[in-house]
Image (spheres, rainbow, N blue to C red):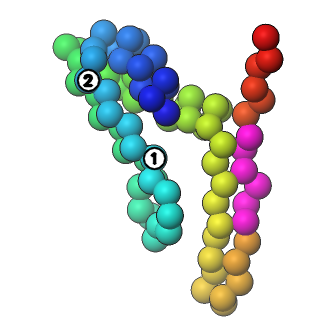
Amino acid sequence: LAEIAAEAAERAGSDRVAVVHRTGELAVGEASVAIAVSSPHRAEAFDACRYVIEEIKKRLPVWKQERYVDGDEAWLDGAVPEVAHD
C-alpha cells in the first residue's frame, strides 16, 4: 500500500498522499478505503486518487466475508495478484 501511495504522490507532483484500507468488520455502506491527496492542481490530485484505487484492485489481495440477514455467511473469492518473478 505504501508503494502505491508513493507512486501516486509522484504522479500528483506531491509528497502528501495518505491511504487507509480498513480491515475487520464493516457495515454495509461503510467506506473500506480512504484516499487523500494534496496537489497544486486538483486534476492531478483526482488522477492520483483514481490511480490508488485501481492499483489496490489490481495488486493487493482482498478477500471479504459477507453476512446475510438470514444468518448465512459466505467468503467471496479474493483477488490474488500474480507476482512477477525475475
Q: Secondary structure at mark 2?
A: strand
Q: Quadrant of the C terminus?
A: top right
Q: Secondary structure at mark 1?
A: strand
Instruction: Say which amino acid is labelled 1.
Output: His
User: Which stretch is magenta?
Assistant: 75-80
Let me know if residue 39 appears in the view: yes
- Distance between the Cα atoms at labels 1 and 2? 17 Å
Q: Position of residue 22 (x, y in %)?
A: 45, 53
Chain-order first, disc 1 or disc 2: 2
Q: Position of residue 51 (x, y in %)?
A: 48, 25
Residue 79 belongs to the span the image colors magenta: yes
Question: Is residue 5 positioned above or below 14 on the image?
Answer: below
Question: Is residue 76 positioned above or below 52 on the image?
Answer: below
Kindly identify which residue carries mark 2.
Answer: 16
Question: Is residue 46 positioned above or below 76 on the image?
Answer: above
Kindly identify which residue carries mark 1.
Answer: 21
Identified at 73% across, 66% down, the residue is 75
Q: Position of residue 77 (x, y in %)?
A: 76, 55
Residue 23 belongs to the span the image colors magenta: no
Q: In screen coordinates, is 68 left or right of 26?
A: right
Identified at 49% across, 23% down, the residue is 3
Identified at 50% across, 64% down, the residue is 24
